[in-house]
Amino acid sequence: MPLNENEFRPKIVAFCCNWCSYAGADLAGSSRLSYPADVKIIKVPCSCRVNPMFILRAFEKGADGVILCGCHPGDCHYSTGNYYARRRMTLLFSMLDYLGIEKGRTRVEWVSAAEGVKFSQTMNEFVEKIRSLGENVRLGDLRCKN
Amino acid sequence: MLKIAKTDLPALFQKIAETKDLYLPIRVADQVNFGVYTQDADVSLETLKTVKSPKDAFFPQSETLYTCNKTENKISITPEELQNKEFVVFGIKGCDVKGIEVLDKVFLSEPVDTFYKARRDHGILVALACNEPEESCFCKAFGIDCTDPKADVATWLVEDVLYWNPLTEKGSALTDAVKDLLSDADDSKVKEQQEKTKAIVEKLPYMNLSLEGWNGDVLTEKFDSPLWEELYQPCLACGTCTFVCPTCQCYDIKDYNTGNGVQRYRCWDSCMYSDFTMMAHGNNRNSQMQRFRQRFMHKLVYFPANNNGMYSCVGCGRCVEKCPASLNIVKVVKAFQKEGGDK
Amino acid sequence: MQELVNRAKELLANGTVQRVLGWKAGDMAYNPEPSYFETEADLSDFVYDAFCGANLSKYMIEASKKEGKTLVFLKPCDSYSFNQLLKEHRVDREKAYIIGVGCKGKLDIETIRKQGVKGIEEISGASMDDACDTLKIKTIYGDKEVSYQSAMLERCHVCKGKDHVVYDEVIGESRDTVDGERFSEVQRIESMTPEEKFLFFQKELSKCIRCNACRNVCPACSCRKCVFDSNKFDSAQKANVDSFEEKMFHIIRAFHVAGRCTDCGECSRVCPQGIPLHLFNRKFIKDINEFYGDYTAGEDIDAEAPLTHFEFTDREPNEERG
Amino acid sequence: MSHRDYSGKIKEISGVNPYKCMKCGKCSATCPSFNEMDIKPHQFVSYVLNGDIEALAESKSLWKCLSCFACVERCPRDVKPGKLIDAARQIVVRERGGDYLSADEIPELLDEELPQQLLVSAFRRYKR
Amino acid sequence: MQRIGVFVCHCGSNIAATVDVKKVVEVVSKEPGVCHAEDYPYMCSEAGQMKILEAVKEKNLSGVVVCSCSPRMHEATFRKAAERAGLNPYMVEIANIREHCSWIHKDMEEATEKAVILARAAIAKVNLNTPLKAGESRVTKRALVIGGGIAGIQTALDIADAGYEVDIVEKTPSIGGRMSQLDKTFPTLDCSACILTPKMVEAAAHEKINIYTYSEVDKVTGFVGDFTVDIRKKARSVNSDKCTGCGVCQEKCPSKKSLNEFNRGLNTRSAIYTPFAQAIPNVPVIDRDACIKFKTGKCGVCEKVCQAGAIDYNQQDEIITEKYGAIVVATGFDTIKLDNYDEYAYNQSKDVITSLELERIMNAAGPTKGHLERLSDGKAPKEMVFIQCVGSRCSDTRGKSYCSKICCMYTAKHAMLIRDKYPDVNVTVFYIDVRTPGKNFDEFYRRAVEEYGVNYVKGQVGKVAPLPNGKLLVQGSDLLDNKQILKEADMVVLATAIEPEASVRKIATMLTASIDTNNFLTEAHPKLRPVESPTAGVFLSGVCQGPKDIPETVAQAGAAAVKAIGLLAKDKLTTNPCTAKPDELLCNGCSQCANVCPYGAITYENKEVNDHGIRETRRVAQVNSALCQGCGACTVTCPSGAMDLQGFSNRQIIAEVDAICR
């Protein structure tokens, strides 16, 4: 897709666990399953490494959406990491809702190493959702806007 | 002496706000603090004590000093603009006016703080005399007459009328600007209220707090007192007392990385905090007792020592009301009195 | 109250405890302060009345480091905090002699002032001995009456209960103070539109002065060094600069105490700007109860904490909520 | 409309991606009307792929399909030839004489025996 | 501040076709800390690596960022190159501008912009990298093979032959697996048992091999080189040491109505049984669900007739805990359930069978003693139809999306064998494609057509319907003739899709080995590391990794064995240095981190600390870096940030976040 000056290009951070989702993203790549360039992936060892502070930090610094991808429950490389991540994110997302942050700016998706298609689909959907929500204003730090 | 009906105050505010920024006590989410006037602001002149003092108007809780921007390999520095528009602080109480005098000692003596000075030069203080002081007030202990505030303009709210008396050139200029709304008045009602209020002041428990024995010469004696070890115990090391205080002037300077550059800002600091004046070698006050002692020694000993006996407390009583552990400067002074008496 | 003083004297005298942690009478009717008492004579200043809202359990972290035992007076709700600290190895049970004290609801001077009371000289009806329903307040501006119930702290209206979860002995009677639904305010916010929610919290949090009173009084915020004071996350900050900073601070603070907060309400009590901070913690408590089953932090020291535990069948984060 | 457009229209109406077809022939194997069809169900897919919609439109098969959906049910690749046929029908029907159903006409058409279902599907098919 | 070198790889045209690598070099060279930036066609080549070496030396670099393919591909390569240059290998970060950028984006401007941002994130991270040193851990010189089929047997034999101890855990009463159920094998038509049995015997007799049959893996802890495994030896109710394998108990057992699993349930067996005649060990087990003694307390016939006194009704499950350096998974496959395929009438007619059932029917030890006959009435069939791809290549939810790979060949085998043995039987095969890559495979298939007259029809069967006359009406298509075929058949054989054995999910979870959506175990790399799981020390053998035939399975079994041997041959392993590390001065001692650690790597001790002059004894967390696997669960649980993860520290991740969001 060519760059269009007027089009809203969201900044999206995707935290991917090393064992499943990062590999899933690799597979999406080697299968040439495209998704928007707005998504930038940060590799973490496990979804349980993702601190809520990282997510808020991303929003603070101007991200419009943050997605966390990990192994499917039951398939965590470290056995239990994604279960903890699931609870943490459930509570965090619920709190963000409570504070009036638009639903859908944050998401968790379980993507296995074999799910290149799912990875690409997920990212396409997520970017679409963020585009529909528009720029993140409520969780951004004004100082980063200029 | 001039006057304006209370019902005409919105018009007065409107008029001032046309050409100047206007700060006055505004209620937001059930708390009254000084804020910028807007037409739909919930102005509350009846509030005796705003939660924070109005010192923000001259020394904001945080302010950017300059911004560095990076483009490729070049860095450009943009200093923050100094205050260049006049503004009015309306409804400031006598104690808080005195608080600003304390800040002046710090920021206007060499080296002059240009940001502060610019604000002082452009700021006009319209003080409002107190008529219902409370039990936590002890301004009189510092020689302040809450019924007769010394500002650019002094005002009194008596029943449905605001009495207006310009005291300085700045005050007169402001008066000229709004004179259409003011009319002449005699000061009998004001005098009457002042007398009544003074009588109440006499009855308030803290007003006659004795500061005997607190001056710039008692440094080691007070510093070494074993009392501190006892007094600090309930202190939670929060910054409430310092942040509501009209005279606390300590700040920290920090950088914020915006991604494309750095904003250097200063923000209030609190001597109650464990990282206060943290330096490379560590911290020069590493126990809460030392930090607690610092605050009171500063207000009652160090500051008078350097400023011709002027205390850096004005008896507003905010810390008395807000301390989560019910500690405060009055309790400290009284504790030393008791100790002295016991001896 | 005298019973408490007598018992404290006994325990000091027989060497069971080295010191007493309680409340010392203030110079006004409503400002007692937490204090240590080391001798019988010191105890002449001891007070326990309806203004002794301060939760002493957090002071036990430091007291646990001192020589010998400390006698501490804990209200029913404080005992939950103590238990939670015990679970986290922050206090030493062996160093504490706990007397559970009765509670008839604690009073909030701010709430009294909000009812137009100023220039307070004396307050009667706040002692533990008189079971007054009305507070008689003598002020410079005349005598006032305020109902006890209307002057209570928010937390007392939705009290967890008047049973102590940890103690060596219990002295004094309590009375039921519950007259509200604990989660009703949370529910009210939940039912708002996102815009309304945002506005509500924006307004409340815009008052925050980052004085850290909420954090420093919180028994769950017992970190030696808070992340907002350290450079571990590049997140150290002292004062609010951008409105987001308070949000970050309050969200993360609530998250850090999620599953650990006993809802003691101290954060809301001490906030100089009257921000209802308990609404953050209570939201997490409500979510935890709903998502993972009822859990009361500090109730059972051996219970699995919600955030260090999981079930295979836990709900998914993206699930529609509320 | 060009053939390509028709082809796209069919894909749009049916929601089917004919490229998924692996040419196994299970649709034709399963079709009860197979013998009456000139273009067999499995061929339908390649006709759509090739954009030869004219031939489809003229084909007898279009009206021989019973819409039993056996092929839809059994297709291992989710291609669902039955839906393609149905889509082709709709295109033909919509095109013919431009005679559409409007909501105003419905009251006249009502009679007691008429199942609701029919009305709804007629409306779906014949509306503009 | 580091001195960072950035190296941008073209990957031939893989990256350079979509990412303007020159532009990336130009932009990132202006990033703070970057003192060298260049591009090169193939960074992973020796010459490319030399670029890193030279730059590190010339520019005195302290950190390296390589913008290239996925770190899963070449991170190790570039770390080694950095090490050769005298740099700590953990001072290297990879920006994945191929899989995550050039391969998925088409627009050059957009892809270049993203590549720059990914590079910036890597630069921001390297700026905060610290040299890490890998630790060492011991290797237990013993391997565990899970599954005793041909894959497991071959792997075990190969490892044992190399001189290492091997345990095989097999959940059924005998080793042998699926291959023992087959009659003949393609394309040579050897008798399956004839080639398998000697292997089974060899394994049983091997002094280095220990076989646990009727046993399952209960629990796995530890990590590469040092796994601890609990093996549950299920109660056999027969003392293996005493049993002579005479078989009298099975003859006399009065409960003979249990379905015979080995014969795919086509006939029955006694409650005390060995699955098949050549079973190893030749020791029966009592099926306690079927045994009258266990059900009613009365009977005890087997105990009475057993001369050796081997029957032991009181035997209990036994847990054996053993340490292993390597684990090979060889759990094999099963055929899928056909409940969702009503159109083939499998559940309605006994004469519709799966190919594996046909194997048993054709086998002399099978339910029909090797005679081809209809299971409904015992009559010899005259007309047989084979249907290919039943449940394979299905993108709907009923079947499997993959090709089961072996069906084309075994169907040709079945057709050929039937035509050979019963020339009067007509055989029709409905196929979508005939896939015969493999040595002598196509020739084999052509022989079935050309020499044995098997009728191959290009088309599928849509419906099989039992007729009142006992026959089966097969309705299929012939796509070449554009006809619909209606055929009355006596038997229909379904080439049913295969899927991994159901127990593999549980095993994968225990091993923390990843599995794909079809439950096949994932390999560490689909091309370059096909027999290793991404979980270190876990290897894959046979169909558990993906469909394959016997020769492929054996080949992979050998490959897995070699990988395991390669591991066992080492005395020590270097461990992952990206482990959790507590800051003792910040630690509250709250134990929350220890509660979430899946490895029990966190302990607490009372320690004297000096916190900026305050000396006191505190309860602080300690991490055993040999046990820590670096998941990071503890780091998020820790409210004060005292616990951090080396290589993925809070500040590093935040720096990446900042770089991306700026």
Image (cartoon, rainbow, N blue to C red):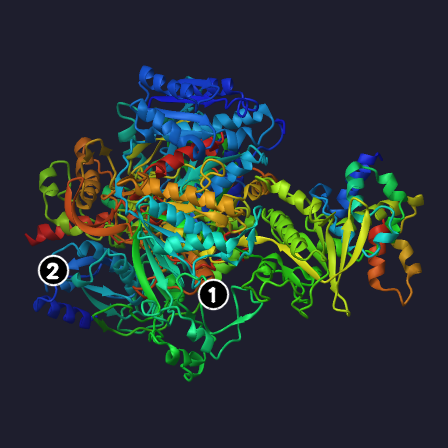
Closest to the observer, E370 or B186: E370
Q: Position of residue E159 (x, y in %)?
A: 35, 46
Closest to the observer, B80 or A75: A75
Q: Is residue E67 in sight in this rendering?
A: yes
The residue positioned 81% from the left and 40% from the top of the image is: D47
The residue tagged 1 is E275
> Chain under label 1?
E
Q: Secondary structure at mark 2?
A: loop
Q: Position of residue A93 (x, y in %)?
A: 48, 50
Work out whether disc 1 and disc 2 sit on a shared chain: no
The residue tagged 2 is C68
Q: Quadrant of the N terminus of chain E?
A: top left
In the displayed structure, does residue E450 sit left or right of residue A105? Answer: right
Query: What amino acid type is highlighted by mark number 1?
Result: Pro
Q: Residues within 10 Å of mark 1 (few under 14, many from 20)?
A: many
Residue E6 vs B292, above or below: the answer is above
